Image (cartoon, grey):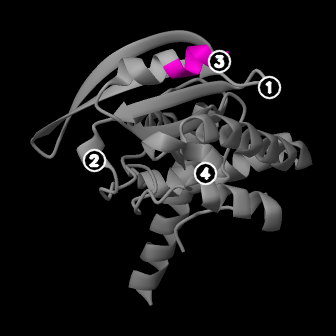
Amino acid sequence: MHGEVLNADSAGLRRKIAREAATLLYFGLEKEYKQAKLKAAENLGVHVLPANLEVALELDKVAEENEGSARTERLVQMRKEALEIMKLLKAYFPLLIGSVWRGTIRRGSDIDIAVYHDEPEEIVSLLRAEGLKISRTERMTVNKHGKTEASFHIHAESSGKQAVEIVVRSSEEAGRKRECEVFGDEIKGLKVNELEKLLRENAGQRFLPS
């Protein structure tokens, strides 16, 4: 019985820290999950850190409390604008990922799309030819599990003035499974035909770990 009480206390404490971290992230006081968790623990004077998933779920609640029904309306609109861009990029296996895929958008969220091609500048030229406003591009390399991953990022603006980030990965990475660092599950995303079906049948559907 005593152990159960301790577990309940621990779970309650983790929730408090997750909530505090989520609040810091939502209001822009911290940008990264790790720093938000450390700051939250410091603010509450404890040494327990919740998982990223716990913080993400609390962040979703904070966004819902602050944005209400307008949040779902904006989500649907962002998905429609994502589809417009994905249709332009249909030859490059576009995949809607991030918060617009999951349905967990909040103020400041952008539209994240992954495409697969070995010549990123071709993607840039295509988007410019189609009238998409591109603000900047950048090459990035990260080290994950001892492997170096390279990607090309295109920052643009949708027809409805939403921020868009298009990540161009090598063609050999198309179809490769990727794990979400926040939610801990597989990043399945939505292909063009899947997004079209979603918008027809259940435009506000969310994709969270069960």
Of labels 1 and 3, earlier in sequence is 3
Residue 176, placed above or below residue 115 = below
In space, the residues marked 1 and 3 are separated at their CA atoms by: 11 Å
Look at the image and tell me in which quarter the N terminus lies: bottom left
Write down the residue under mark 3: 132
In space, the residues marked 4 and 3 are separated at their CA atoms by: 21 Å
Question: Toward the viewer: 124 or 34?
Answer: 124
Q: Is residue 16 visible?
A: no
Write down the residue under mark 2: 173
Residue 171, image x and y in percent?
A: 29, 42
Question: Toward the viewer: 158 or 107?
Answer: 158
Write down the residue under mark 4: 101
Q: Nearer the viewer, mark 4 or mark 3?
A: 3
- Magenta-drawn segment: 126-132
Left or right placement of residue 62 versus residue 4 in this view: right
User: What amino acid is found at the position of numbered circle 1 in the picture?
Assistant: Gly
Write down the residue under mark 1: 160
Of labels 2 and 3, earlier in sequence is 3
Q: Nearer the viewer, mark 2 or mark 4?
A: 2
Residue 74, image x and y in percent?
A: 82, 40
User: What amino acid is found at the position of numbered circle 3 in the picture?
Assistant: Leu
* Quarter of the view holding residue 179: bottom left
Q: At 55% from the left edge and 64% from the top edge, which residue is drawn?
A: 12
